[in-house]
Image (spheres, coloured by chain):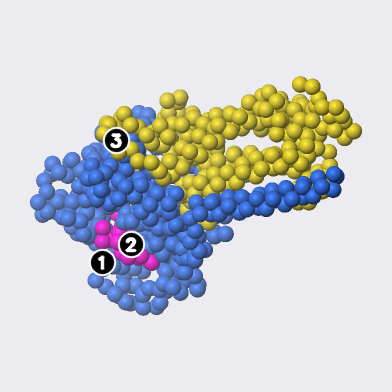
Chain colours: A yellow, B blue
Amino acid sequence: MSSKAGYKQVKRMTPAMRIIHWVNVVSMIVAVATGLYIAAPYYQTLMAEDAVDKYVMAWNRWGHFIVAIIFDVTSIIVAYLFFFSRFEKPWKKVIPTGKNIKEFGQVVVNLLTLNRTKNFDSTHSDSFNSVYFLIFHLLLFWMLFTGLQMYVHGLGSGISSIGAWWPAMLHLVTDWTLPVSSWFIGSTATGTNIMDVRISHHITMWLIIVWVVFHIYYQVWRTIFWKEGDIAIVVGGSKFVKEDKEA
Amino acid sequence: MSIDKEESVKKLFTAESAKVDTNKGDAYYDELYASCQKRIEELRELEPLNNRMDFMESVEEQGLERRDFLKWASATTAMLMLPASFTPLVAEAAVLMNRVPVIWVELSDCAGNSEALLRSDGPQIDEIVLDIISLEFHETLQAASGHQAEKQMDEAMEHFKGKYLLFVEGAVPLGLNGQYGTIGAKGETFVDHLHRAAKGAAAVVAVGSCATFGGIPAAAPNPTDAVGVMDVIKGKPIINIPACPANPSNMVGVILHFVLTGTIPELDSLLRPKFAFGYRIHDNCERRAHFDAGEYVEEWGDEGAKNNFCLYKVGCKGPMTFNNCSIIRYNEGVNWPIGVGRGCIGCSEPDFWDKYAYERPMANANIKAPTGGVEKTVDEFGLGLLTAAGIGIGIHAAASAIAGKKEDEGEA
Ligand code: SF4
Ligand code: SF4
């Protein structure tokens, strides 16, 4: 790819990061479509077939769990890269140092003044972007823990096809979501219940969808206004910055 | 933040699962058998208490045979998750039930649990067992009233100090210093009454959803600040037997376990005996195949309903509810709610009235805000948020476009 005169190509996403991004996109679409069916089956299956042949809910749950597991794995990789990536150090951008807070503010100002002022370096991921992605991954982690909490109750016997350690571990790792969900959702009763976990799982889906809508909008907006080809990052892995800007 | 929330936040990483260990190994059961045998011998030495009814006589009076009794004993042994070799011990314990004193108090409730015991289609063994327990004091059932009743209770508490089981039915209103509920000639508040009765109890058994989790009295907006027993009584063994009403079989199970072993059964994190609440309704439901197939009752009385399809879309909460009604059923195993074509309303879970008992799937439900008043569905909220974000983005995009155009003109 030849650079436009006066522009410099900067690498922003490694192939691994881009693969994870698109795996997550597909997983999320599947998770929302199947999740909505699990919450309230929105199509009917009144066909003249034996129950075993239709298996519609079971397939939806199957799909939901499979993409959940894929999400689990990519999240673990992302969490690892967050701290140990040699490529970028996103965690350095989210700690509230004076420099980061100032940069965060500048990016917000840039967005609100419709790109009239732009007093930050847009070559690399800025503080605002890093925080925004951190929020996404926190939402995602909440989904994973609450989801596995609901899932483990299907293994009430304490055994699973891969051994008793699996449900035991899930209980150990996810039981804390019960009191936390009850605390979020609020309840007037004594004790905690899985319904609160379920409600918060459902609400968080909406938060993630809202997150995605703004995410797509912002990437497109930046591409148009910054004129640095930001949208290409997620495909080719790099964007272009004016030479004189490169510090 | 109410007391239970703080408590549960403290317990964050220590929550116990509902997992039931049904086989603890021969060594464990041999030891248990020996200790149970010893306890039964000790009990046999004791005189029956006030209640002079004889168990086997009562069984015969009701036209039941010894065979029925033995069948019941082996079923109950299985329910308590004990090996079959314990059957004779369980039978023996049932006969000796009148040696264990029980005091039963009623707080904010509808007496539905007492009703459940009394109004079954005919006295079955479970009910006879409950007839025969030495009910030293039961506010609804006793003949005494006023000062006389109070005296009776004081005497029972004094006499059986440290030995009696305290059964509590109904929630505890804490609002207005507990003045929402008073009892007796002296106008003692429910909460004081409970504290007094619990003091000398060997263990406290909360029966029904109100006594365990606050139930309907604690539903939003909870005007009386009602709470469950475990929020009030600390430092005593507490056993919760929720459900609305609690299944008599589970009450008998707990008493039998106590008579037999002198201890309380293994409990889950909500203090429910695992032998009864270690099961999820959904996993033992006869309609489960239809759930997996996506065959649902869409409307009451439709073709699906006639074919016993799954009740999920008319609001069955079996997937989030732990109870053994799908296994032991009600009225001596005759039937149970889902069997008669109604969804489970999660009556044995905390907050069931606000969060389970609507006849729609969760995604279509108007869940009441816990503080009362505002009703908002989760999806409306989500869609609203999405719309707000969309509008915001739209405005920003339009403004950006206009601003961009002006800039271009400026440059030109
Ligand atoms: S009727 Fe209820 S408990 Fe039974 S399979 Fe359907 S959702 Fe589950
Ligand atoms: S089926 Fe559900 S609502 Fe009905 S008694 Fe059992 S737990 Fe309660």
The answer to the question of whether label 2 and label 1 lie on touching residues, with beta carbons closer than 8 A, is yes
The span from disc 1 to disc 3 (Cα, nearest Å) is: 55 Å
User: Disc number at residue A47?
Assistant: 3
**Chain under numbered label 1:** B
Q: Nearer the viewer, mark 3 or mark 2?
A: 3
For image coordinates 18% across by 40% down, the residue present is: B71
User: Residue B116, located in which quarter of the rendered image?
Assistant: bottom left
Q: Secondary structure at mark 1?
A: loop
Q: Secondary structure at mark 3?
A: loop
The span from disc 2 to disc 1 (Cα, nearest Å) is: 10 Å
The quadrant of the image that shows the N terminus of chain A is top right
**Residue A104: percent from the left, percent from the top?**
78, 46
- Vertical position of residue B165 compared to residue A21: above or below: below
Q: Is residue B112 magenta?
A: yes
Q: Nearer the viewer, residue A47 or B256?
A: A47
User: Disc number at residue B104?
Assistant: 2
A56 left or right of A186 in image: left
Q: Amino acid at mark 1?
A: Leu
